[in-house]
Image: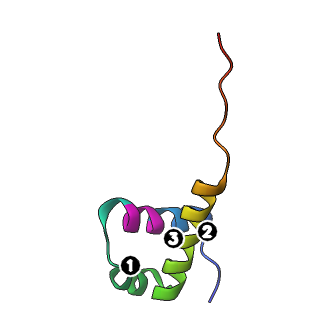
Amino acid sequence: MADPAAGKIAVIVLAVLRHGQRLADMDGGNDVSESTVRRWRDELTTACTSSPSPTRKAA
């Protein structure tokens, strides 16, 4: 199975996070397994929570 484009991964993960789509509902129609969708979701949430927030300079 070929790796899907980053845009497709983003759409699938956002559907899971934002709209509460079940992982099992997202896998079949997108030619990826439920475990892959779960891994993508976990990688994204880890990346978002572990990166430092950008600091703003006073104007």
Pick whichever of labels 1 and 2 is earlier in the sequence: 2
Going by the numbered disc 1, the residue's amino acid type is Met
- Residue 41, disc: 3
State the residue position of label 2. 5
At x 38% / y 80%, what residue is drawn? 23
Span highlighted in magenta in the image: 12-17
Q: Give the Cα distance between marks 2 and 3.
A: 15 Å
Q: Residue at x 68, y 19 (%)?
A: 57
Identify residue type, mark 2: Ala
Q: Is residue 9 above or below residue 37?
A: above
**Colour theme:** rainbow
Q: Mark 1 and mark 2: span between their CA atoms? A: 16 Å
Q: Residues within 10 Å of mark 1 (few under 14, many from 20)?
A: some
Q: Is residue 43 magenta?
A: no
Local SS, label 1: helix
- First in sequence: mark 2 vs mark 3: 2
- Of helix, strand and loop, which one carries label 2? loop
Which quadrant, please, contains the N terminus? Answer: bottom right
- Magenta span: predominant SS is helix
- Note whether 38 is above or below 53 in the view shown: below
Residue placed under numbered mark 1 in the picture = 26
Mark 3 is surrounded, within 10 Å at the Cα level, by few (under 14), some (14 to 19) or many (20 or more) other residues, namely many
- Percent from the top left, x then y, of residue 41? 51, 70
- Residue 17 in picture, x, y percent from top left: 39, 63
Q: Residue at x 49, y 78 (%)?
A: 37
Spatial CA span between label 3 and label 1: 12 Å
Mark 2–mark 3 CB contact (< 8 Å): no
Q: Is residue 15 left or right of residue 8?
A: left
Please tell me whether mark 3 or mark 1 is closer to you in this view.
3
The residue sitting at 64% across, 79% down in the picture is 3
